[in-house]
Amino acid sequence: MENNTTTLYLENVNKSFAKIEHDTVTHALHNISLKLNEGEFVSLVGPSGCGKSTILKLVAGLIYPTSGRVLVDGKEVKGPSPDRGMVFQNPTLFPWLTVEDNIAFSLKVRGVLKKNDERLDRMLKVIGLENFKDDYPRQLSGGMAQRVALVRSLINEPEILLLDEPLGALDAFTRMNMQDEILRMWKQRKQLVLMVTHDIDEAIYMSTRVIVLDTNPGRVVDDIKIDLPSNRDRASDKFIEYRKRILDELHFSNSNQSGL
Ligand SMILES: Nc1ncnc2c1ncn2[C@@H]1O[C@H](COP(=O)(O)OP(=O)(O)OP(=O)(O)O)[C@@H](O)[C@H]1O
């Protein structure tokens, strides 16, 4: 039954980085084994340096494990692919291209951009920027730029969407709106999303599953299925229970803090 769905498998992954100048080695990830499936929205949370971004980069094919394997649909990841779209915290839009041309860029490079490509209008509509399509990145707010960066990845219809703190640079209000916007996009296609966030509430609010990591060496300490309705109430008892469980695991008990 699983054959037609995308599966991402990290199999006993270890990743070390050598720091030649200090003659030291950082064990960024220790024996990570995870199986993720299409339709899941998975968040990675944990303290700074526990290896969250390293996991995303491994899945993106930007770096390789020291040992172990990263498999997508049974095939080992050997490099980047438009099937695995990555969105970073500070979107790197091309400043010399308009909003529309930024969104069209990857289609053009891949030689699949059609004349009057209707996908562009559709994506502009999804993010409510139809009236800004001829603007340049410097004319956009942070939230608008982040929306462009998101649909620029989504237009390639990636099987796996990798989000590295995509909302970290936004103010609280824009951030909450963007959380809903990402969820709306995800509900339309239900691809596999793997998101790094420092914000535990954001992880619980958005995800079907939260992976908790700890540091030295980076390792998985919990893998939690979030059993909440799709429209979530951040103040519900169950939501607060999940928050407490994660904070306890990260040694923040008796704290009201929800971000790390
Ligand atoms: N290219 C690199 N060279 C050397 N060390 C690295 C490199 N990339 C990551 N590391 C180290 O690996 C560990 C994990 O880094 P990573 O960026 O994955 O953590 P993180 O959980 O995403 O942290 P943060 O929450 O602060 O972004 C850290 O100790 C970091 O210093």
Image (cartoon, helix red, strand yellow):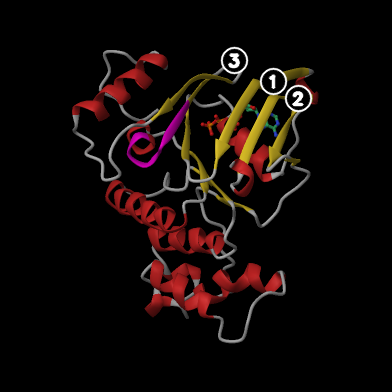
The residue tagged 2 is: 19
Q: Quadrant of ligand 1?
A: top right
Query: Where does label 1 land, which residue?
Result: 26
What residue sits 41% from the left and 15% below the top?
249
Q: Secondary structure at mark 1?
A: strand
Gap between marks 1 and 3 measured at Cα: 9 Å
Mark before the other along the chain sequence, 3 or 2: 2
Residue at the (76%, 20%) spot, across then down: 22
The amino acid type, in three-letter code, at marker 1 is Thr
Region of the chain picked out in magenta, as a range: 204-211
User: Does the beta carbon of the residue at mark 1 sit less than 8 Å from ligand 1?
Assistant: yes
Contact between marks 1 and 2 (CB within 8 A): the answer is yes
Q: Quadrant of the N terminus?
A: top right
Q: Quadrant of residue 247?
A: top left
The amino acid sitting under disc 2 is Lys
Q: Secondary structure at mark 3?
A: loop
Q: Gap in Å between the C-alphas at discs 1 and 2?
A: 8 Å
> Would you name the residue on which mark 3 appears?
216
Q: Residue at x 42, y 25 (%)?
A: 224
Tell me: residue 124, above or below residue 88: below
Which mark is in front, 1 or 2?
1
Q: Which mark is residue 194?
A: none
Residue 220 location in percent, x, y? Answer: 54, 20
217 and 153: which is toward the camera: 153
